[in-house]
Image: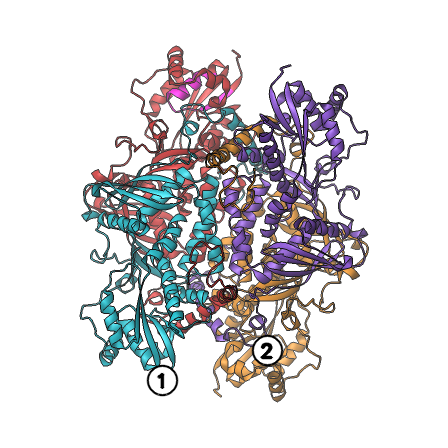
Chain colours: A red, B cyan, C orange, D purple
Amino acid sequence: MPANSGRVLLAYSGGLDTSCILAWLIEQGYEVYAFMADVGQEEDFAAAEAKALKVGAKKFFLEDLKREFVTELIYPAVQANCIYENVYLLGTSLARPVIARGMIAVAEREGCDYVSHGCTGKGNDQVRFELAFYGLKPDIKVIAPWRLPDFYNRFPGRQSLLAYAEKSGIPVVQTAAKPWSTDENLFHISYEAGILEDPNVTPPADMWKLTTAPEDAPTQPERIAIEFKAGLPTRVVVPEQAKEYTDAVEIFLALNALGRKHGIGRIDIVENRFIGVKSRGCYESPGATILRAAHVDLEGLTLDRNVRALRDQFTTIEFSRILYNGHFFTPEREFITSSIPASQRTVNGLVKLKLYKGNVVIEGRESSEGLYDEQQSSMDELGGFEPTDTTGFIAIESIRIKKWAQANIRKGQAGVAPKDVYGSRV
Amino acid sequence: MPANSGRVLLAYSGGLDTSCILAWLIEQGYEVYAFMADVGQEEDFAAAEAKALKVGAKKFFLEDLKREFVTELIYPAVQANCIYENVYLLGTSLARPVIARGMIAVAEREGCDYVSHGCTGKGNDQVRFELAFYGLKPDIKVIAPWRLPDFYNRFPGRQSLLAYAEKSGIPVVQTAAKPWSTDENLFHISYEAGILEDPNVTPPADMWKLTTAPEDAPTQPERIAIEFKAGLPTRVVVPEQAKEYTDAVEIFLALNALGRKHGIGRIDIVENRFIGVKSRGCYESPGATILRAAHVDLEGLTLDRNVRALRDQFTTIEFSRILYNGHFFTPEREFITSSIPASQRTVNGLVKLKLYKGNVVIEGRESSEGLYDEQQSSMDELGGFEPTDTTGFIAIESIRIKKWAQANIRKGQAGVAPKDVYGSRV
Amino acid sequence: MPANSGRVLLAYSGGLDTSCILAWLIEQGYEVYAFMADVGQEEDFAAAEAKALKVGAKKFFLEDLKREFVTELIYPAVQANCIYENVYLLGTSLARPVIARGMIAVAEREGCDYVSHGCTGKGNDQVRFELAFYGLKPDIKVIAPWRLPDFYNRFPGRQSLLAYAEKSGIPVVQTAAKPWSTDENLFHISYEAGILEDPNVTPPADMWKLTTAPEDAPTQPERIAIEFKAGLPTRVVVPEQAKEYTDAVEIFLALNALGRKHGIGRIDIVENRFIGVKSRGCYESPGATILRAAHVDLEGLTLDRNVRALRDQFTTIEFSRILYNGHFFTPEREFITSSIPASQRTVNGLVKLKLYKGNVVIEGRESSEGLYDEQQSSMDELGGFEPTDTTGFIAIESIRIKKWAQANIRKGQAGVAPKDVYGSRV
Amino acid sequence: MPANSGRVLLAYSGGLDTSCILAWLIEQGYEVYAFMADVGQEEDFAAAEAKALKVGAKKFFLEDLKREFVTELIYPAVQANCIYENVYLLGTSLARPVIARGMIAVAEREGCDYVSHGCTGKGNDQVRFELAFYGLKPDIKVIAPWRLPDFYNRFPGRQSLLAYAEKSGIPVVQTAAKPWSTDENLFHISYEAGILEDPNVTPPADMWKLTTAPEDAPTQPERIAIEFKAGLPTRVVVPEQAKEYTDAVEIFLALNALGRKHGIGRIDIVENRFIGVKSRGCYESPGATILRAAHVDLEGLTLDRNVRALRDQFTTIEFSRILYNGHFFTPEREFITSSIPASQRTVNGLVKLKLYKGNVVIEGRESSEGLYDEQQSSMDELGGFEPTDTTGFIAIESIRIKKWAQANIRKGQAGVAPKDVYGSRV
């Protein structure tokens, strides 16, 4: 076994896998420092520290990244309405860049030659972590044991890990492992693998950890209001608690608590991983689901139509893809996010919401931006422009359509192209 | 008053506005035929016919367009996951092309010189109708009274219409007008105008016509299954009714009934009309909401990642905009829809759903397409590819990212651009 | 004729149309101030001023807008590689916002109630001017005589204008009118209308005003170099002149002179106007054509692949459309241009060019950005990454493609979809 | 040395690399069949066959793929105006799918277990070939010697290959190797590597093989005409030759000959390979350059504005990227190309061109499609629509812009956002 292979900073979770990796790295001759990020997950950090040191870590670093997670990752994603494949709010993807950045900062400060993680060789997280490492420190060396034949051939299953743990003096918690794996942070929890790998299996009721089931949520709706400035939530009013929240992190946590109580934010999807494999995942994102609904709604009142359309088609979709694929520390992310502030300048106002058994119901919104004009939009009165203007508008809009229709008629294809699948009669 | 101004086919609703328009057109010397389309709205068509003829229409035409509405408009929109501004399922937009086409067919057959409608000068529907007319019959002449100063100056408000109705022998129903206006078809009902013009007013509970309020919906969830072939629903299984539906129209109506019962498909938004005015609208789309959730989910299991991404960014967004703006009979619609079949070839399978108090919960899905591979996606076993392959993948993916990071470091901008708003530390 | 209808600032060109409009506005009781913008067109401004005052303008304003035209409009368009419908470099579109802004500034300062212009009712420029006016000063009132029936019915053709000019004491130049109309500024000259309206008529050789015909251009190529910083040209080296240009305006003018000499930048197209009418236009953009070629080339060396792809698909296309349609002073322009700086941060370097008889030939480029790495791209040596990494990359890239191919084979559609038009054998 | 490792179909070029690979594969115990595709490259196929058999190939297959190359790959790309990174016409990318398909067909017919190629581990072609193999026959096994350490470590440079050739009885042509490498087919020739790896080195005049230098091209322009049906060239008229070409392949070859004569179609770029490495390439695409110019021009006359805009932004860009990255036999290619026919239905007509010293000059175009209307576009007459219609159009278009401008004024940001980089004065 080589001594002095170098110093490794290991992303440590306290679980069986990374404990075994810790021991194995030491066995390979590395000096190992353990790193944990507090991104809001429920975790006994002290126990994890004790365990890491017991297994042999020379140092242990716990970084509280909650605030930067909320303000630098989550809120830009809220501003851009990020969503992946129509459904997934990107909770794991959003945490990876702050964790990777925290890790690289420690690695640099502590003179580590390597960083290491316990991600499997088939998932997104290995890609997200490593591309983030390289985007921040291109000469960093990465040890990914689950992609090293020496490691994965030696530990083909849970039994071999347990045996190694016993041999290595790694304490093993005697609770039965859940038949799925999870990733938790203050934005969400994810469930995948195990019994969920059959996409037709309904997740058992006791899987869902964060949110009350809608069936068990309060039978009384609860009403709240969220104020936004430049697309960011700046105040949450919760009358039932007689409280207002104005701090960025507290706002998010308050919305989380409300969402959890009212059964909001569960999803169950088959998604496409970056590596091209389809994968089934279940997620709970209570606060984020409320926030997204409110933000999307307020944009209706305060965002120009054309900006919204361009932002939806480009910024939302591209930023979401960038996040999902772990491309946060890249030039394309820099490019895409540079357009967010201009899109959110006018997104100022207040949204009223009702929360009830899984539903986030918009009940009203107001803003002093002035892009909405009751008189102008009113069907009941003239105002804003002459009805005859619309005649001109339609006349101009129809110029090229009439030309096309005339050509169709000349060709005997009235109103329709030869192989046109829809709309073919008259 | 000129006699013999020509023959007009009027889109007739049976209400006060179009009855007055009917009388007014006759007064202007036109011969008027009245046209109604049955697109699934709740309506006393016989009463409307009687009224039209009483007011002076020479003929009355009722066209049942429900099947073509479902199969030629709604289902392509389902295949493409159409949605406008993240929220609106386009129920009114989808009905306009079939109504316009039905009207042009009657106008041609019956030798009408004009078509006419009662849409206001500020809304989307005037544009949708007229662009559809011109796209089908570019030389058709359109009379839009609410944009003619002669008409709108003469009838500045409801009182003047009522007075005219009385004078013209138009029967007026003595029920109090609702403080909003609606448009209904088998896809949805819309509410706008009146008290809804204040976007901060919560719609009154008794406004919602189609759906039970989630609060009043059954306390027991109901489970159903929907089968799709090439992205189209071909079977709906409703165990509670011990029934299966396989006819295209019946499937949609069955889903509607289920959605209405379980409080599904209400929305309340401020949207951007084609003419650039913001407008508040409320909608109920019960069946469509269920169908969309199921279709989006099945695509996760059966649609290739890259096709889905391209389709989401282009087909979904562009087709939705085309529909909303009334550009159905245009070359761009022909172009955009021509790509739908290739996107749906593999969307075959069955989705299991739970309906409960406003929630559409996916509980599982299956397909024989084979794009999902449990062994390949499994985190618990090797299979499908070597973990070392991913090392190569990440190495290649990081090539350009490392170059960018190296340049940043040389410039003293580690991990970040000079004015980069997010992600700026280390 | 009413006196004191108010004060109008008229965009005056010195030609027959705007001189008649000037006289006509006075006849309608307006006090008229004449406005000219110097955007680099060849023009006898003193003669125009004398003429305006002679016809009756109370004041005359000449604004030199060349520098802001170059730095605030042209250069952002160069940075974004703007082009309309694959061919047109947007020379007229780019000038309109600075002219409109100059006009609004004078109108505000001089207390004008109205602005007026001589654009026809069918073109793009009326839209560009008026939308710019409204985007800067939404309450400005616009007089567009060519869209006022009182005016256009009174002056149905050139003869009636000439007659009116004679009657109104407007001096008329006795040169034969060219059988086309032009718009010139320092970016380009456009030709349209008249004999060009037949799209199959080849423009006569003597139409082209700015550039030498390639056939008549020097038989010796000329070599120059252009340096860019953040995507902006900062230095042009012209060895044949033994000169370097570093001032923003001088750079553009120097490139113009070179392009004119070497027959560079003529195009002849049928384009789609904003109002939906197709229109034939010929353009000469000598300097801009050189600049675009150099900028596009340097981006190959210095811009990240993914940023370039996103910028090409979104920023370039959307900003070009915004410019063409006259949407410069709009929220969507603010949104789109906000992403340009992040896209150009690394576009620093020098491009070597050869100019020869209409050709702009790239002969080399260099940069210290370091995104290009000879060793890494070399086919002749290892370096940068292991060849085996690519094996992993291809393996991962092929995962979803193999799944699709397997499904095709199961269905008897090896390698191809049922209705797939291309690639159908094996 | 193992015997009977299986049967390999090797993409054979006749050059040093693939001859050594052939010998090496035999040495590894494989039975090797050699495959060559005739895609229009200049090549002594008989000599290559003799050489392959001499080195030890058991069989030799030459497939003439020229017609399918032109009709199934090149012409769809012409219809879609494909281009990569604004400049490159994709000549190599287009040939790969037909070659791969030809190879898989032979491999299946001849019972080969493997396919093999001589592409390096850093380029695009390895990816294009292998993804095409997998998209057609997902279980095919690929041998890529330049990515196998056993091979590339044994042959670190040209000298070791020459030594191996001598030892293995491989005839070596005694001409000096060019200091660059090339790939040729009937669409183009590419040059890369060697001295071209310095992006600032101007390619030597004698590198360019296909085209006359513009400086040496005829001093007399030559005029031709190209007719298109549904976006495909169906007739080329060459008055100087008193000939017309109507066969698909002959058309392309005739345009190639014209382009070569007149010095058309040279480019020199730094491009971004799929693997993320920047690379310098020079290309000659004479006929394709003419064809693209003509096709783009005719679309101006015959293609609806909105279809063109959507096609440019999506189909052109995405299909070009798909081709470049070797994703031809994929679901996304099937999806993207399915929309081409609808975009080309109206692209019918004739384009007149002048060819002169590197320039392709459009001199006119005609079509019976009728989307262009001289009277309607004429600036000199009323026709098609009322000038007052445009007033309405502008009024409606300005609604949302005025609202935005009013808000800016209220905030003291007349005409501009706070951090807006452009357009900031007034």
Residue A117 is situated, as x and y percent measured from the top left of the image, at: 45, 25
Left or right placement of residue B69 versus residue C369 in this view: left
x 54%, y 51%: residue: D340
Q: Which residue is mark 2?
A: C18
Residue C265 is situated, as x and y percent measured from the top left of the image, at: 69, 59
Residue A147 magenta-highlighted: no
Left or right placement of residue B347 versus residue C184 in this view: left
Residue A12 is situated, as x and y percent measured from the top left of the image, at: 41, 24
The Cα–Cα distance between marks 2 and 1, rounded to whole angstroms, is 45 Å
Q: Amino acid at mark 2?
A: Thr
x 34%, y 45%: residue: B234
Instruction: Establish whether labels 2 and 1 are both on one chain.
Output: no
x 51%, y 65%: residue: A400
In the figure, B413 relative to B321: above or below?
above
Which mark's residue is nearer the viewer, 2 or 1?
1
Judging depth in this view, the residue of C423 and B22 nearest the camera is C423
Q: Which quadrant would residue D3 be assigned to in this image? A: top right
Output the chain of dot 1: B
Residue B3 — which label? 1
Q: Secondary structure at mark 1?
A: loop
Judging depth in this view, the residue of A301 and B65 nearest the camera is B65
Q: How many marks?
A: 2
Residue range corresponding to the magenta coloring: A7-25
Q: Amino acid at mark 1?
A: Ala
Residue D103 is situated, as x and y percent measured from the top left of the image, at: 61, 33
Output the chain of dot 2: C
